Amino acid sequence: GVGHTCGVRTDGSVECWGLNEDGDGNYLGQSDPPTGRFASVSAGISHTCGVKTDGSVACWGSNYLGQATPPGAAEAPAPDATSAETEREALIALYNATDGPNWTNNDNWLSDRPLGQWYGVEIENGRLIGLALSDNGLNGDIPPVLGQLSDLEFLELDLNQLSGSIPPEIGRLSYLFILLLYGNDLSGEIPAELGQLSDLFWLDLSVNRLSGNIPPELGRLSYLEGLVLDNNQLSGEIPAELGRLSNLEHLTLFGNNLTGAIPAELGQLANLDYMDLSDNDLSGEIPAELGQLSLLTGLYLSGNELSGCVPGTLGDVDENDFDVLGLPSC
């Protein structure tokens, strides 16, 4: 899973370890398997299912979408009419705010068809879990009412002509797994409320006109594997709190106006594979702690005002721009 793991022992019993709750500390039980003999198990984001040796299926953990209710078991409660109406109203607000009549594809939007038949809307077990409207001609501001889509797991509004600021209400989407807003004309600051998205796996806000500091609250996103903020107008220092992102594999901050030193805390990102901090106004020495990143295969630091030397421990990084830094190795 994202924060837990389960395995089948040779005697057929199952053992799980890791997280057993959601980001708010609420018990989910994804690491509390039932008794019995299992042939196999598979872990999801916050639930697990297994096939027993008798062929039956058992699931445990989060069931907010019915994902822990296998076929033949008691069904999860259907969404109430109030929730469905709220979702429809939020989608209508998005359509009206972003020039819906001129979208590239607006099939069935504003019709009486079920929401799952509206283009780009993903429904699962009666819950609205996704909006996939990439490169679809959306033009205008993102309406704050999207923060009411409480079951949303992915929000993909990239490669459009969206403007204005990112609504802080997006931070209410506690199940959000993927947030893609890159390739728009968004401005203003990155809302600190995005640090509340405890399940977030990938955040891409690149190629916009975002300004201000990188919120240190983003360091709370313990499941995050991709943080992509390049080609904006971000300023200030890189928050040391980003060093807490223990699952981070991809970090791109190039093409901004970031200043100050590269935080030594980035050397704590044990799973980091790729980092690009080039074309900013960073200064100071390259932290020796970056040499602790044993999985790092790509590192780009040019276009800054760095001094000192390139730590010899970075010599195993396959893809780099060290040759244009003008710094000796040490």
Image (spheres, rainbow, N blue to C red):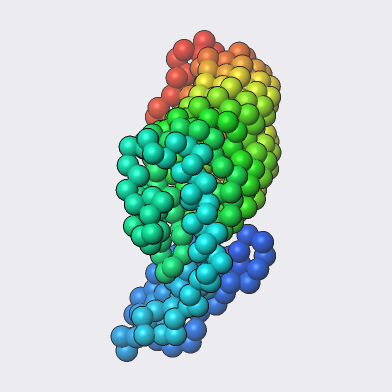
Residue pictured at 63% horizontal, 29% vertical: 188
Q: x, y percentage for residue 305?
A: 61, 13
- Of residues 102 and 327, the one drawn nearer to the viewer in this rendering: 102
User: Which one is in front, 324 or 187?
Assistant: 187
Q: Position of residue 204 (x, y in %)?
A: 49, 38
Where 41 falls versus 169 (above or below)?
below
Picture quadrant of residue 237 = top right
Q: Nearer the viewer, residue 304 or 171?
A: 171
Query: Could you tell me which quadrant the C terminus lies in?
Result: top right
Q: Is residue 44 visible?
A: yes
Residue that extends furthest to the top in the rendered view of this protein:
326
Left or right: 89 in relation to 318: right
**Residue under the point 58% across and 22% down:** 233
Above or below for 273 versus 317: below
Task: Identify whether 234 is placed above or below 144.
Answer: above
Please give the name of the residue rendered at 48% of the width and 49% of the height, measured from the top-left corner. Answer: 92
